[in-house]
Image (cartoon, rainbow, N blue to C red):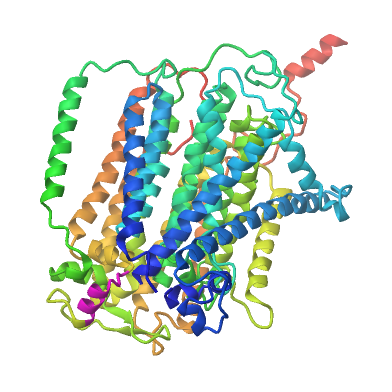
């Protein structure tokens, strides 16, 4: 029912609001405690230095990072799109194969085959390897 | 009872609030100097777009918007920011910004014209048979006919002709179908060619990423790197 | 108020207590509530607010209980006593810890980006709490039973990757950034097998809604979908960064990874998000693979659900007590070379079985109990050889370079050592 649809999401939005307020409230109580001097606030320059295991911090912020992390993110986006396309099909798969027999499965198997070729290519080129 | 949720009041208020949030976040994206913060605000405006999808009864598209854009594309952007040196000093003013402003304005105008000229039919006055069938789940060809949860197979051959009686009735009373199975059916039937093409696009992106990585391999190893 | 919404018993009890005069409530035999008719929208908002508070505070209470329980159980595993000072059997220890955390000094590093640094804990905890909104914890006891519940869970939890990147980047600490990058790489790698392992379940249930998933489980899907369960369980362990996949913040070895520079309540909130994610993960596993709140009478459905969640949590703690931590290369190999293929095998086998059994049953359902059993049998037959083969594929190389199987005596004495020893004499 459309009324129920919007009601569900109205409840969900109120839930989001409470879920945002609760952690902010916890941080807020902690902050209040520092205002009434229950929570200590004696900050020094040493305390505010970046924590590197207790040693004196070396150098400044690193500038560039290895590219391999980026490839994992790229793989993630690609296969995320694949997943998103498989979900509605999977929900419908039983009915579709009742109507069209094995042809419906064939269309998806072709899709999976194409993606798997790309996956095997990446494997072959040692892109899935941590170097 | 007087139903406040079908009365368009609250829904349209939610729509305007969300649009305002989305646009504000988008403006922050282009005005902020720190591009990591800009990426976070971009994620916020993606969330706003997802909420608008939810308001349009497109639950599946809304969730996919969160999954792919907030969950995946934002991380890709964050990673690419971490790859670029000197982000902490802020992005430099872009030399081609007047060209960029012109192009963006033209695209915006085109979208506005299309949006203005489109016939946004209300559910209660739908006439296009395909739209009715899609919205009400006639493509689903099965329906909980009795209240006890039994599925009755309504599929009887041809589905692309005029909407059936119950589909029209459902459309007029505003009963909409769960859109996910409809999309699934369409992917394997009407849109099977785009579906396979997306597979090719995925493969292309994998190979493109590999080519980028190949180019980097010859460079000296970046400082640090886990 | 339409009937469909009032079928939610927890919602109905609260709503009809406030606005009993509403037509839906009167039909169900509720007396008039204290709000006059015409203010149903207010009753609705109050009900939703109360429900949200019940679920969120329940989750937070669960976190405190879980921390205490985990410490006690781990202590038993290691033949220790565990926390036993505060409250009976030390049950108030985590409450004391929470209060202590709140009153600790809050340090923000000089070079941190204050805005993102303060925002990251909130962004981290909100998606985890949102998961509890769509999980039915008993018959008709759910905050919002949306049509796309399962995908909603996967979508909102994927936002935590961005939160980790924010936390790491904003502290401007090289250690935090390195471990943050590793944590996000691990997170995104396991999200793919996690999402794909559910595809087999979707083919059987034919719906994305949580209540539909539970309704379809005449036989729990852990039996029908063993491969799907294995992959989903391992991937969710990685998503909630539990042992053996907790290398990004290995408590006993590293400082705290991307949480390195956090202190006081900000650290508390981040910590809370992690433990709440563990409970949420256990709740999702229960709902999707252990048939949720379903059980037999006279034990109430809520107790069934709670019992199953506690059982899953116990297994997770058991794994923590038993298994060593994996290295980053092993972890990523497992995700991309092991679990990914297992999900593909599971997907194709289940798709073929579903297509073969796609006829409608006499009672209108897609699969009869017998068909589910056949599916389970085939899946178990596929399960063992495929896990064995993937294990072979991922098996570590032998330690010895020359390929011989026997391990060297420890400590390894080389000729050089012998020469040095001779020199010392």
Is residue B175 rendered magenta in the image? yes
In-image side of A39 versus A131 (left or right): right
Residue B93's place in the image compared with C55, above or below, is above
- What residue appears at the point 70 percent right and 29 percent down from the top-left corner? A34
Residue C408: image location, x then y, percent: 72, 34
Residues C197 and A43: in front is A43
Residue C87: image location, x then y, percent: 86, 52
Residues A48 and B126: in front is B126
State the image quarter where residue A106 is shown.
bottom left
Is residue C109 rendered magenta in the image? no
State the image quarter where residue B172 is shown.
bottom left
Residues A54 and C245: in front is A54
The residue positioned farthest toward the front in the image shown: C36
Residue B216: image location, x then y, percent: 36, 23
The dominant secondary structure in magenta is helix
In-image side of A60 versus B83 (left or right): right
- What residue appears at the point 39 percent right and 32 percent down from the top-left corner? B39
- What residue appears at the point 51 percent right and 65 percent down from the top-left corner? C43
Residues B161 and C129: in front is C129
State the image quarter where residue C422 is shown.
top right
Q: What stretch is highlighted in magenta?
A: B166-177
Quadrant where the N terminus of chain A is found in the figure: bottom left
């Amino acid at each position: 029912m459309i009324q129920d649809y919007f009601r569900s999401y109205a409840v969900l939005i109120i839930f989001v609001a409470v879920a945002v307020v609760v952690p902010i409230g916890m941080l807020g109580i902690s902050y209040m405690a520092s205002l009434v001097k229950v929570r200590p606030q004696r900050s020094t320059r040493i305390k505010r230095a970046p924590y590197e295991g207790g040693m004196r911090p070396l150098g400044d912020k690193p500038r560039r990072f290895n590219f391999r992390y980026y490839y994992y993110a790229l793989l993630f986006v690609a296969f995320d799109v694949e997943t998103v396309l498989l979900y509605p099909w999977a929900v419908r798969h039983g009915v579709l194969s009742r109507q069209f027999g094995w042809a419906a499965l064939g269309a998806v198997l072709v899709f999976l085959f194409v993606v798997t070729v790309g996956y095997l290519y990446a494997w072959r080129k040692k892109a899935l390897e941590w170097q | 009872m007087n139903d406040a949720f079908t009365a368009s009041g609250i829904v349209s208020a939610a729509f305007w609030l969300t649009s305002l949030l989305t646009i504000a976040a988008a403006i922050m994206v282009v005005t902020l100097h720190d591009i990591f913060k800009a990426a976070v605000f971009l994620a916020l405006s993606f969330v706003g777009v997802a909420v608008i999808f939810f308001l349009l009864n497109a639950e599946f598209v809304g969730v996919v918007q969160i999954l792919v854009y907030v969950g995946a594309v934002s991380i890709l952007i964050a990673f690419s920011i971490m790859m670029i040196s000197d982000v902490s000093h802020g992005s430099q003013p872009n030399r081609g910004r007047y060209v960029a402003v012109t192009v963006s304005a033209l695209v915006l105008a085109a979208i506005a014209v299309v949006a203005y000229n489109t016939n946004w039919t209300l559910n209660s006055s739908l006439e296009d048979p395909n739209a009715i069938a899609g919205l009400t789940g006639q493509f689903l060809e099965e329906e909980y006919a009795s209240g006890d949860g039994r599925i009755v197979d309504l599929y009887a051959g041809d589905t692309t002709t005029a909407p059936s009686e119950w589909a029209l009735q459902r459309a007029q009373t505003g009963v909409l179908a769960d859109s996910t199975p409809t999309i699934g059916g369409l992917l394997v039937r009407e849109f099977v060619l785009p579906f396979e093409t997306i597979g090719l696009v995925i493969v292309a992106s994998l190979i493109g990423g590999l080519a980028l990585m190949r180019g980097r391999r010859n460079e000296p190893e970046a400082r640090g790197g886990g | 108020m339409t009937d469909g919404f009032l079928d939610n018993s927890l919602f109905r009890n609260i709503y009809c207590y406030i606005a009993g005069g509403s037509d839906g409530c009167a039909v169900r035999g509720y007396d008039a509530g204290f709000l006059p008719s015409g203010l149903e929208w207010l009753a609705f908002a109050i009900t939703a607010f109360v429900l949200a508070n019940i679920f969120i505070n329940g989750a937070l209470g669960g976190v405190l209980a879980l921390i205490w329980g985990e410490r006690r159980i781990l202590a038993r595993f290691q033949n220790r006593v565990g926390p036993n000072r505060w409250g009976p059997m030390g049950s108030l220890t985590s409450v004391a810890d929470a209060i202590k955390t709140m009153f600790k000094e809050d340090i923000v590093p000089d070079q941190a980006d204050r805005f993102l640094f303060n925002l990251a804990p909130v962004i981290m905890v909100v998606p985890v709490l949102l998961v509890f909104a769509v999980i039915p914890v008993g018959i008709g006891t759910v905050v919002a039973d949306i049509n796309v519940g399962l995908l909603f869970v996967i979508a909102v939890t994927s936002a935590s990757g961005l939160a980790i990147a924010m936390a790491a980047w904003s502290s401007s600490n090289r250690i935090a950034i390195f471990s943050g990058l590793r944590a996000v790489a691990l997170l995104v790698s396991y999200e793919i097998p996690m999402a794909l392992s559910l595809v087999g379940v979707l083919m059987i249930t034919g719906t994305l809604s949580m209540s539909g998933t539970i309704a379809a489980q005449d036989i729990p899907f852990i039996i029908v979908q063993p491969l799907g369960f294995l992959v989903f369980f391992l991937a969710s362990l990685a998503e909630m960064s539990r042992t053996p996949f907790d290398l990004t913040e290995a408590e006993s070895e590293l400082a705290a990874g991307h949480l390195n520079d956090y202190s006081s309540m900000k650290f508390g909130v981040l910590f809370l998000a992690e433990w709440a994610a563990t409970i949420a993960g256990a709740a999702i596993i229960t709902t999707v693979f252990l048939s949720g709140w379903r059980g037999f009478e006279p034990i109430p459905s809520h107790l069934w659900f709670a019992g199953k969640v506690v059982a899953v949590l116990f297994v997770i703690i058991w794994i923590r007590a038993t298994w060593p931590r994996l290295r980053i290369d092993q972890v990523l190999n497992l995700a991309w070379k092991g679990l990914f293929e297992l999900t593909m095998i599971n997907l194709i086998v289940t798709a073929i079985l579903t297509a073969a059994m796609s006829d409608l049953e006499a009672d209108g359902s897609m699969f009869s109990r017998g068909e589910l059993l056949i599916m389970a049998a085939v899946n178990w037959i596929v399960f063992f050889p495929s896990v064995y083969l993937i294990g072979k594929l991922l098996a570590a190389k032998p330690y010895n370079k020359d390929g011989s199987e026997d391990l060297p005596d420890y400590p390894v004495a080389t000729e050089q050592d012998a020469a040095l020893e001779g020199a010392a004499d």
